[in-house]
Image: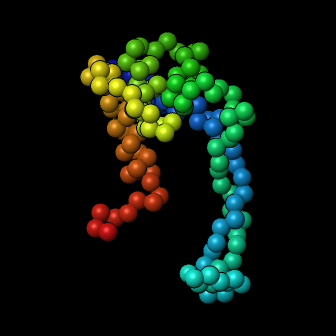
Amino acid sequence: MPDDTIKVTSLLHDLAKIDFYTTEVRNKKVYSENGSKSDEMGRFDWVSVPGYRVKESKDRDLICSEHGVNSYMIANRFIQFSAAEACAIMNHHAGMDNGFVLRDLNEAFNRFPTLTLLHVSDLLSTYISENPYQIGEDE
């Protein structure tokens, strides 16, 4: 597998997410002994913190499908992809989005190792490397 294939699929598979989120301010409970309010967990104050939320569909540029297909369509305006690269970018969630729509991707996984590598690395990144909620193995 060419290094350029790994680079281009890794960099562009979530391209559509650039226009997917917007910023907002949320209220968050911050617990402390000096909190002015209380609940079953203790004393707290509400604090405004910056956050993100998914934009409404009507406010996004390209919404023809899930973000893998959208990412491919945006990048394909500028880059000619191989079949392996296109398949990897479009299917890197392997049906794990849009309510876990089941699709038979066995042939794609068998034919394009790039898809398998991108899918697994995306899972590792999301659920292990960059997961702020990760629980230790001993818990």
Residue 93, by quadrant, is top left
Nearest to the observer: residue 103 or residue 3: 103
Q: What's the residue at 56%, 81% (across, down)?
A: 41
Q: Does 54 appear above or below 110?
A: below
- Residue 46 in the figure: left or right of residue 39: right
Locate residue 78, reporting x and y percent: 58, 15
Locate residue 134, reporting x and y percent: 40, 59
Q: What's the residue at 64%, 43% (across, down)?
A: 54
Q: Does 96 appear above or below 106?
A: below
Nearest to the observer: residue 10 or residue 28: 28
Q: Does 38 appear above or below 50?
A: below
On the rendered image, what quadrant is the C terminus found in?
A: bottom left
Residue 136, by quadrant, is bottom left
Locate residue 126, reporting x and y percent: 43, 46
Q: What's the residue at 44%, 38% (across, down)?
A: 100
Color style of the picture: rainbow
Residue 25 visible here: yes
Q: What's the residue at 63%, 74% (across, down)?
A: 30
- Residue 47 in the figure: left or right of residue 5: right
- Residue 108 in the figure: left or right of residue 36: left
Residue 4 visible here: no
The total of numbered circles placed on residues is 0
On the rendered image, what quadrant is the N terminus found in?
A: top left
